[in-house]
Image (cartoon, rainbow, N blue to C red):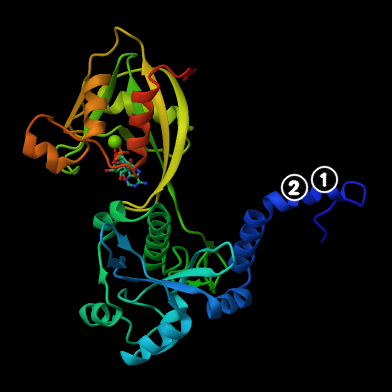
Amino acid sequence: MSLYCGTACRRKFFWCYRLLSTYVTKTRYLFELKEDDDACKKAQQTGAFYLFHNLAPLLQKSEHQYLAPQYSLLELERLLGKFGQDSQILEDSVLIGCSEQQEAWFALDLGLNSSSSVNASLQKAEMETALQGSFIKLTKALFELNVKDASLLSTAQALLRWHDTHQFCSRSGQPTKKNVSGSKRVCPSNNIIYYPQVAPVVITLVSDGTRCLLVRQSSFPKGMYSALAGFCDIGESLEETVRREIAEEVGLEVDRLHYSASQHWPFPNSTLMIACHATVKPGQTELQVNLRELEAAAWFSRDEVATVLRRNNPSNQQQSGAVPFWLPPKLAIAHQLIKEWVEKPTCSPLPA
Ligand SMILES: NC(=O)C1=CN([C@@H]2O[C@H](COP(=O)(O)OP(=O)(O)OC[C@H]3O[C@@H](n4cnc5c(N)ncnc54)[C@H](O)[C@@H]3O)[C@@H](O)[C@H]2O)C=CC1
Ligand SMILES: [Mg+2]
């Protein structure tokens, strides 16, 4: 189908098309690969593969950061052959994106118990030697990856985990079958389609106008404080979740709130973090911390938070002993929310 609406406006639309073409073409190519098994199999022939072992990505350490190596199908088949593994395991790979030149990117886990391969779990140490890298937990590696790799590997891990934990139909109990791209699983006995799940979570930086509220869960790394987060309950709007979570966890009522940004977050499962700023009424700031949810919550001044942001490295702080807390790393949306508040403390909010 033509992308132009007619000869008269061809020139004008040519410019629009030229401006959008890379992104639109890439998006439509990925859509085709998700829907069409044959096209996706073909794309694997020229595609690149990222490797995992039990959900830990294969990484190579360069001077200052981790790099995620890519392998061609041919390289992968050779490697599998070397380990006496048949290439059926490739059926477990999932599509995670593509380059601007339409080179499709896939992820494959060599350590999970595969449904399609007899001898699925390959020896981790032997693989690492052959691949000249290490399978490193994403929780450890994420913050030392560049933004592109961090995002790709987060997506890959979430998708691989979802397939690993959703291999059976919850209605019939029969094994479900993954399509080639991994965008869905289907139960052959009743045709129920299962799509990868994402849980919406709101993360809110609460302010009383001059201070912001930071909280700690006992599961956080020592000394780290963050914005207040919570899963959306079924039936709730985003605004309702923000109001409920703030009331539940610290006993405050939201006066105004506004949306800031969102982020896919792979821990502990796939969540969509929806980041907001909220204000409470001045004079209604007394905290009643729910100790079943939080270990601590406190108000911090803009100066205190700005100081910690400037030197946000827990080991430095422990050495100097000068700053009692630290904040989530740059890649986390909590960091962006806090930074936004420090830089623009009086952005115009909407009523909740
Ligand atoms: N990217 C970032 O900057 C940050 C991300 N987070 C993420 O936000 C998420 C939610 O924060 P929490 O305060 O723990 O949520 P929360 O305040 O809703 O409490 C967690 C509890 O909610 C219940 N729950 C309801 N629906 C759930 C679901 N779909 N999955 C798991 N538990 C569910 C469970 O009982 C669980 O123990 C966490 O997974 C955390 O990793 C938290 C802070 C910063
Ligand atoms: Mg919470």
Q: Nearer the viewer, residue 272 or 330?
A: 330
C-alpha span from label 1 to label 2: 7 Å
Where is residue 165, by image quadrant? bottom left
Q: Nearer the viewer, residue 313 or 82?
A: 313
Residue at the far front in the pictured view: 63
Query: How many numbered discs, if any?
Result: 2
Residue 271 in percent (x, y) is at: 40, 48
Q: Amino acid at mark 1?
A: Lys
Residue drawn at point x = 41 percent, y = 34 percent = 275
Q: Mark 2 vs ligand 1: CB under 8 Å? A: no
Where is residue 295, by image quadrant? top left
Residue 41 in percent (x, y) is at: 57, 78
Residue at the far right in the pictured view: 8
Instruction: Please determine whether, in this image, residue 150 is positioned above or below residue 219.
Output: below
Q: What residue sits right under mark 1 in the picture?
A: 12
Q: Nearer the viewer, residue 146 or 156?
A: 146
Q: What residue sits right under mark 2 in the picture?
A: 16
